[in-house]
Image (spheres, coloured by chain):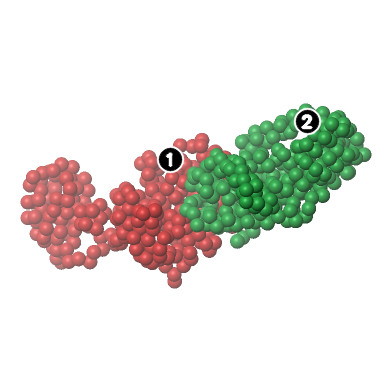
Amino acid sequence: MSLLIEAKGISHFFGAKQALQDVNIELAAGKPIALVGPNGAGKTTLFSMICGYLQPSQGEIRVLGHKPGSAALFGQLSALPQDALLSPDFSVGEQLGLFARLQGFSRAKARSECERVLELVNLSETLNNRPNELSHGMKKRICIAQALIGSPKLVMLDEATAGLDPVNARAIRELVSMHSDHTTFVLSSHDLSELERLCDRVLYLRQGQLATHELNQGGAQLRYLTLQLREQDEQVLAHLNALDQVVEVSNSQRNEFVIGYKHLADTEAMDIQVLRLCHQQGWQYRALVNGHTLENQLFATGA
Amino acid sequence: MDPVRIGKLMQFELARHFLTKKAWLALLAFALVWLMIYRYGVYEAVNILAQPEFEQFILAVFGNLGLQSLLHWPDAEMAVYCLIAMITFPPFIIYLCSDQFVSDRERGTLRFIALRATRLEIVLGRFFGHALSTAFLIAISLCGALILVALRDISILPQALWHALQFELLLLVNLMPFIALMSLLNTVARSSRMALIYVILLYTLGLLILSILQVKLGVPEALDYLFPGEPLDQIATLRPPLMSAVLWPLVQTGLFLGLGFYKFQRGSL
């Protein structure tokens, strides 16, 4: 079986500036994949190459075994490109209908498919509206809807929830989660907590170079918990260090502690011990994360 | 390349030109302009066609291309229509076709389409959509001339219809290089306005430089045919040279489309 995305030594230059440097990727189908990195790291460039919008200066990229942009990928690969908008000349239904018909749907089936995907993003009532009659968030959700036409194997979403209100952002996350069994999503976002909830694999781009992470599957001897408190207490480090099995505790950022411990059989679970300690000391905790947060994995540990 | 997808893209372009609110307004403006042309141009001109001064005027404006033979057509309205159409349609079509995909590309709309159609299909779908729209517009404008002919003398309507059909095809073939040129310019411009500026520069500076080269260096005058529209004044007689007024515009269309596709294929979306 061919890989979902395979990139060999791809580099790209915008004039003298190198946007991507010898990037190699091998991704198989599965749970959603996060594409993260600071501004200017090359995320959108990589995204554009996978979708076939941009050709690499060097190297080769294959999606589902085909060259990006080839007809074999129509209906298999779909995307929400960053900042892309529908035409203001036609209604949402007309444009989504065209996309569906280009994917091979008959006129009647294209209409029902448009209604289905708009229902998924709770925008059924916009079928006859022109995009310029809708809010920014609604336009974004409609662009997400077009990415779900048919049964794509790979969906690329660039900043899918940026600019959406919390309720709709949550609805989009649920949508991604719901479709993850049969579609592999690649999500580019700056919202690490969102990616953490959805993704098992992370592509981390920094200055055009790529590092791949499997979230919380380090296979190290130590296990980790991340404790986030509402308020900082000077005694927290000392109390946590005093717990059995704890090997190291670091104050990763304000009100956040990363606890490294050795798991021993026949002993009380470490998360129970930490929660009991919070209760005894009267600490208000905000979250207890099993493992490192994505943010700490990428940045605090030096990625 | 899938002809079915090209057909769907072409249909969508036709809908853009004839079924949107913006299109209806544009069509209304087009119809009103032609109404004015018929009322104050064709209708009045028919009355003076027979005057010898008018034949001298045609000779002075167009040279000895045989256009004066038009003045002896029994369907005089068609003759006047042909003269006006071959002058007014090229700039109108350049304007109409100035945005074949440039605004869609800048807005990002083309990225949605490029996931469902190849770039060649997009270029051809848009081109054929514009070409078919042009054919419809020529036909609409021709209807006015035919109505005027029928109102004056219904017996010459069959001849006028035959002239109309020939002129429709000849004008369309000669307008296709303009459409293809605008498709090419859409690949280099960042807006339809810039595409229009490029075509104006091409026709002013380009022709100026060529004429200087022809005068100073003796460059062949046949190079005028590099510019779309050169054979246009030969088609009004409906007996143009096949090579220069029919085959060459088709070749030119293919060349412009080929160049445009090459640029479009290599560029980013």
Tell me the amino acid under the disc marked 2. Gly
Q: Position of residue A87 (x, y in %)?
A: 54, 43
In this rendered view, identify the residue nearer to me: B213 or B155: B213
Dots 1, 2 in contact, CB < 8 A: no
Q: Is residue A240 left or right of residue B103?
A: left
Residue B220 appears in view: yes
The chain assigned the colour green in the figure is B
Q: Position of residue B234 (x, y in %)?
A: 77, 47
Q: Give the residue drawn at x 53%, y 59%.
A: A74
Q: Give the residue drawn at x 85%, y 46%.
A: B162
Q: Which residue is mark 2?
A: B41
Find residue A48 and report its image quarter. bottom left
Q: Give the residue drawn at x 17%, y 63%.
A: A222
Per the rendering, the colour in which chain A appears is red
Q: Which residue is mark 1?
A: A137
Q: Is residue B144 left or right of residue A64?
A: right
Q: Give the residue drawn at x 16%, y 45%.
A: A255
In this rendered view, identify the residue nearer to me: A230 or B128: B128
Q: Between tags 1 and 2, which lies in front?
A: 2
Q: Secondary structure at mark 2?
A: helix
